[in-house]
Amino acid sequence: MPPKGTAKSRSPEFRLAEDALRGLRQDLFHDAFAYRPLPRMSMDGRFTRRLSPRLREYAVWVPHAAVLMGALWATLISASVNDSGGFGSLVIFLLAVGPILLTLFRPVGAFWCSMAATPVTATFGDSWSDWPWQTGSFASHLVVLTVVALRTRPRTAAWMWALTGTYGFVVESLFGAGRYSSNTGPLLTISAFVLLGVTLFHIRRAAQREVTAQQTVTAHERSKRTLLEERTTIARELHDVVAHHMSVVAIQAEAAPYRVENPPPELEQAFATIRENAVAALTELRRVLGVVRAEDYEAPDAPQPTLADIDALLTNVRDTGLTVEKVVTGAVRELPQGIELSAYRIAQEALSNTLRHAPGATARVEIGYVLGGLGLRIVNGPPTGLVKPSPGAGHGITGMRERVTMLNGEMTTGETDDGGYEVTVFLPVPLTDGPE
């Protein structure tokens, strides 16, 4: 037995009923007559985006026009079967059109107005063969159910359908049993199919929004991951390049005093200081940049490639079937290894993009040695032949931009006039960094 003073746990059936009543109160009673104007139609659809700007100005009002057409349809049906004339016809007309027009501003309130208008219409109507829904009320309520279901969520549509059926069966059992022909069944059947279609529309649209949001997040995460991977690769390469030079400085500083006969103590101390600083800088460099290495990463045995190796790269590319030429302008000179490595990687990635996205095209690599740095341009023609371009997310461009940004350079990309693509890069090199 449960301890005294504690409430008994509620049964699952009681909790289910409580949740249902809470949902009914939230959907159909809480702020039922809140002002919620019908929004204009979005122009981002598959067909609407193809319309001219002039037509788009009118196309945004299509939902409102559809509601007005529904009101006109209900009015014509009501007028075709109502012969009461005078004040009765005016009341029936208002009760048929009013709830439909109210869906433009207060959708849930329009449902309650339609429910309240049904017995009033039956009082003024003269067609007792349709009970408890007069022909005008039948059409008007069907339109209201459809519009309100479109403007709310599927649970609200289910509650409206259930309340409509409850009202019809209660009125039939109390006032029309055995005297009139019931049309509650046909109304529930037709409205069930309509609301089912509306619910499927809601589910499909929600799924599309979810897929679009997921694709956006996935693309963002993929781009972010690619950016981090590229930065890691650049950091690794720079670590190897700088570590090599710092090691050479330390070794030369240690060996320099032995190359001079009877060096003065000041010179020995200077070289010792240089070696200590080089070793300290190398240790700090390995501590900071070494964290970007993967556990299975191994430093390359061969030296990092430079622009002197560009011919071997072009040979490998030509073996794949790509026609590529190299043009060099300016006085060829040795540049800092970071510049040489980045220029080589940029050319390599640009040619790889050409192979993937422009099969059958020709390419040209232009290298320009200028006074203030290095110019690089890789351009390809439009794709030709029967081979289709390979799909890709374009992350190679991101990696190239990272390298250029790291070196304070400039980079532009874009299509050429003939349908090809070009990558233009300038990497600044201070004059003091060049060889003496």
Image (spheres, grey):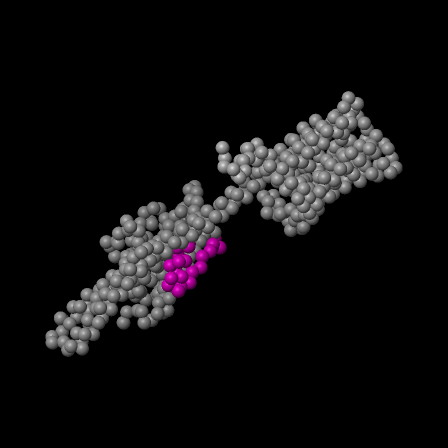
Residue situated furthest left in the rendering: 261
At 19% from the left edge and 67% from the top edge, which residue is drawn? 252
Q: Which residues are magenta?
A: 397-418
Q: Give yes or no for residue 182 being in the magenta stretch.
A: no
Query: To which quarter of the image does residue 375 belong?
Result: bottom left
For residue 392, say whether it is visible. Answer: yes
Residue at figure coordinates x 38%, y 54% from the top left: 228
Residue at the location (69% across, 30% down)? 165
Q: Nearer the viewer, residue 342 or 290?
A: 290
Rendering coords of residue 315 (x, y %)? 31, 51
Question: Exactly how many numbered labels are in the figure?
Answer: 0
Q: Does the stretch in magenta take in 411?
A: yes
Residue 214, image x and y in percent? 49, 45
Residue 77 in sight here? no
Indicate the position of residue 237 as horizontal and vertical percent values: 31, 57
**Left or right: 38 as drawn, with respect to 425:** right
Using the image as rendered, state which of residue 350 and residue 365 is in the foreground. Answer: 350
In the rendered structure, the answer to whether residue 58 lies left or right of residue 300 reads right
For this orientation, the residue located farthest to the top is 178
Residue closer to the observer: 308 or 150: 150
The percent position of residue 194, horizontal first and vertical second, equals 65, 33
Identity of the residue furthest to the front in this view: 4
Quadrant of residue 409 within the rendered picture: bottom left
Please give the name of the residue rendered at 73% of the width and 36% of the height, measured from the top-left corner: 115
Tell me the quarter of the image containing the C terminus. Answer: bottom left
In the rendered image, the residue lying farthest to the right is: 86
